[in-house]
Image (cartoon, coloured by chain):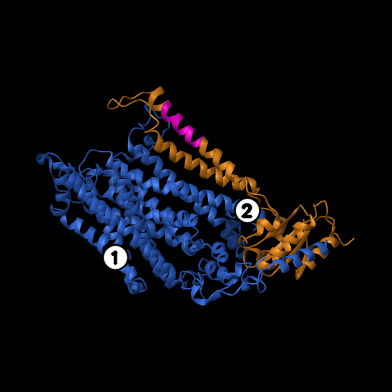
């Protein structure tokens, strides 16, 4: 048997072609800097979730936790008193709650784009950021889901939305896009959690094998499901991961499309627009990448992860923001053009009112942040200036919130009959509930970085030169391309 | 006999992906059936080197998806057209068009569960007890270790023979794993 083995080896050596080394300028920049080894990567990344929490973590956690508690207090006040504590009033019955719902769920979309679509496109740089982005998705969808639930008025009857037999003997009415939304958002949440968890299994095994306390060993061991790194398992695992990516891709495109149908299926000028589904999806990815940058730029600094989340990653994300921001700009232009070209007086008025009416400031803040600001990313100087990128990433989300605002309440406040016009002002409860969801989001995110590896360890190991059997660092001999 | 009464198999350690890829091809050619390669990340080309067939996970996902789509369509027809018909705006009681979005979401949902449970089923996970997980050296598998294990249950298994093969494949550390 040993002879057969030796034979294979010699055949492999003979058939190997000797290839000239490629010139240095054609070499792709490394995804992990300084040729770090797989062992370094597990120590570095798993180390974030081990040992004592740093001071900044405690400070951030306390602030987030208090903010979250305040948010829950607002929700308790709302439910115990009634929706009258919000500013919604005829004709604007969809106010901040729906604006926040659409905004948060849009933020989630970047996580799925990074984990699913970039995976299918074989963008190997996604491995450094996909775990944190997926966590962001899950938490953002949780924040988003809060709002439709509490805006129901009688929130305790939320289960009437699900197709389960209830005391009234009436089923949900599936001709309404609001029902489609229930299915889209709950599926999106479930599949995002599944995808996240499947990606976590090998890394939970890393945490299990590094645990020093019984408690950690027990819980990481339980959720790692007995993962051994067997290649027979990797074979099925990678297929399952590919399928999940393939399923999440149409899913993520469908979710914000379905959200947009809540509006476009109605007959309100400003909402009744066929461009909505792609327009909403582009905006969602645009705002989500903004949030990913807002989260990762400080994190890579505080946790010293500059070698794993490199400037190249930041640069590429800026380019995605530039591309999707330009799509959003195109959609804005097209909306105005169609409003003019339709010749419909109500449609024309809705858009004139959006830009020049009492809410002109919302529209122009949105246009400035979503159309003009991302265009700065054409310049490499801007893309490589971290402070600027951080500020722009926040402006992107300010702009996107304004977009949701100028679409939803601004279209509602002046519809067909001037006698029913009104002006919508949110109350302090509206504002503090929204602030509270930030508390929820950051509390969950901070717990995530304390207890789970925030970068996909085994995936990042897989894209290093050390993992490549055809690279010298992976143990290949010269010209060993067998 | 140096072979313990309840040996699980022979575990050999390797240093790099290239080494273990070559070694796996040798063991495949030697004709073993019950053996496996353990790595911290999937090594490119290992499925070929081990002679593995494609995964069956896709079937589970496909069945989940088909089930999801038709249960969605059926559910909506039953609820809105059969059990309690609500006429709305002269629209048809049932149409595959308005039923599509929820049915599509259910396709994705059950397809994703199919992929997850298919992966767990084909891998026989969760398996919280495994002889290898008791071995302290094996802990490196999630860190930076590369291992090949030839199981004692293999029809061709003999400890001396397997040890020789693993040595000639370039392993620097070989040890027997207890059940």
Q: Quadrant of the N terminus of chain B?
A: bottom right
Mark 1: few, some, or many residues within 10 Å (few <14, many ≥20)? Answer: some
Which residue is disc 1 drawn over?
Answer: A375
The part of the chain drawn in magenta is B67-77
**In the rendered image, is residue B136 in sight?**
no
Judge left or right: residue A375 versus residue B168.
left
> Is residue B67 placed above or below A242 in the rendered structure?
above
Residue A371 percent coordinates (x, y)? 26, 60
Residue A451 percent coordinates (x, y)? 50, 61
The residue that appears at 42% across and 27% down in the rendered structure is: B77
Q: Quadrant of the C terminus of chain B?
A: bottom right
Q: Secondary structure at mark 2?
A: helix
> Is residue A94 placed above or below A163 in the rendered structure?
below
> Is residue A305 placed above or below A196 in the rendered structure?
below
> Alpha carbon of mark 1 to alpha carbon of mark 2: how far?
43 Å
Q: Which chain is orange?
A: B
Residue A327 lies in what quarter of the image?
bottom left
């Amino acid at each position: 048997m040993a002879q057969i083995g030796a034979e294979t080896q010699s055949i492999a050596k003979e058939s190997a072609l000797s290839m000239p080394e490629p010139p240095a300028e054609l070499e792709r920049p490394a995804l992990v800097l300084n040729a770090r080894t797989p062992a370094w990567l597990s120590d570095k990344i798993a180390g974030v979730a081990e040992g004592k929490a740093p001071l900044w973590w405690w400070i951030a956690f306390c602030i987030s936790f208090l903010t979250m508690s305040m948010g829950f207090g607002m929700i308790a006040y709302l439910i115990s008193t009634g929706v009258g504590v919000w500013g919604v009033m005829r004709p604007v019955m969809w106010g901040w709650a729906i604006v926040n719902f659409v905004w948060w769920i849009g933020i989630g979309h970047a996580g799925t784009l990074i984990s699913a679509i970039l995976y299918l496109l074989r963008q190997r740089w996604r491995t450094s950021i996909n775990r944190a982005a997926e966590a962001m998705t899950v938490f953002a969808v949780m924040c988003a889901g809060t709002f439709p639930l509490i805006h129901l008025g009688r929130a305790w009857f939320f289960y009437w939305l699900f197709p389960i037999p209830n005391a009234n003997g009436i089923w949900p009415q599936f001709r309404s896009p609001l029902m489609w939304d229930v299915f889209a958002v709950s599926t999106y949440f479930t599949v995002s959690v599944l995808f996240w968890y499947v990606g976590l299994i090998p890394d939970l095994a890393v945490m299990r094998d590094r645990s020093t306390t019984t408690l950690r060993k027990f819980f990481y061991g339980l959720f790692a499901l007995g993962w051994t790194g067997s290649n027979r398992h990797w074979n099925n695992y990678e297929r399952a991961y590919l399928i999940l990516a393939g399923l999440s891709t149409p899913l993520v495109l469908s979710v914000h499309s379905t959200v947009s149908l809540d509006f476009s299926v109605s007959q309100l000028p400003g909402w009744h627009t066929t461009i909505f589904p792609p327009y909403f999806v582009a905006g969602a990815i645009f705002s989500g990448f903004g949030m990913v940058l807002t989260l990762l730029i400080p994190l890579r600094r505080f946790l010293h992860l500059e070698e794993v989340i490199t400037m190249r990653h930041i640069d590429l994300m800026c380019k995605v923001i530039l591309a999707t921001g330009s799509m959003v700009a195109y959609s804005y232009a097209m909306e105005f053009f169609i409003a003019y070209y339709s010749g419909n007086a109500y449609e024309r008025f809705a858009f004139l009112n959006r830009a020049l009416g009492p809410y002109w400031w919302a529209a122009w803040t949105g246009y400035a942040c979503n159309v003009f600001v991302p265009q700065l990313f054409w310049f490499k100087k801007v893309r490589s200036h971290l402070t600027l990128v951080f500020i722009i990433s926040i402006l992107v989300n300010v702009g996107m919130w304004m977009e949701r605002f100028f679409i939803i309440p601004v279209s509602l406040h002046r519809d067909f009959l001037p006698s029913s016009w009104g002006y919508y002002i949110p109350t302090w409860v509206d504002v503090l509930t929204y602030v509270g969801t930030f508390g929820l989001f950051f509390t969950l995110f901070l717990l995530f970085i304390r207890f789970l590896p925030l970068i996909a360890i085994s995936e990042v190991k897989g894209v290093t030169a050390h993992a490549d059997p055809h690279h010298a660092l992976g143990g290949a001999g010269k010209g060993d391309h067998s | 006999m140096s072979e313990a009464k309840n040996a699980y198999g022979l575990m050999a350690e390797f240093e790099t992906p290239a080494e273990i890829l070559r070694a796996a091809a040798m063991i495949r050619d030697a004709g073993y059936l019950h053996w496996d390669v353990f790595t911290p990340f999937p090594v490119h080309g290992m499925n070929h080197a081990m002679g593995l067939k494609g995964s069956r996970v896709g079937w589970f996902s496909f069945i989940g998806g088909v089930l999801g789509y038709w249960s969605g369509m059926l559910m909506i027809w039953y609820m809105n057209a059969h059990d309690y018909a609500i006429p709305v705006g002269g629209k048809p009681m049932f149409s595959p068009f308005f039923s599509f979005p929820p049915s599509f979401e259910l396709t994705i949902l059950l397809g994703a569960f199919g992929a997850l449970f298919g992966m767990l089923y084909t891998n026989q996970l969760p398996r919280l007890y495994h002889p290898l997980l008791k071995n302290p050296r094996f802990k490196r598998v999630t860190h930076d270790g590369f291992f090949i294990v030839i199981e004692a249950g293999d029809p061709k298994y003999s400890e001396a023979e397997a040890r020789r093969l693993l040595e000639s494949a370039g392993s620097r550390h070989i040890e027997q794993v207890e059940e």
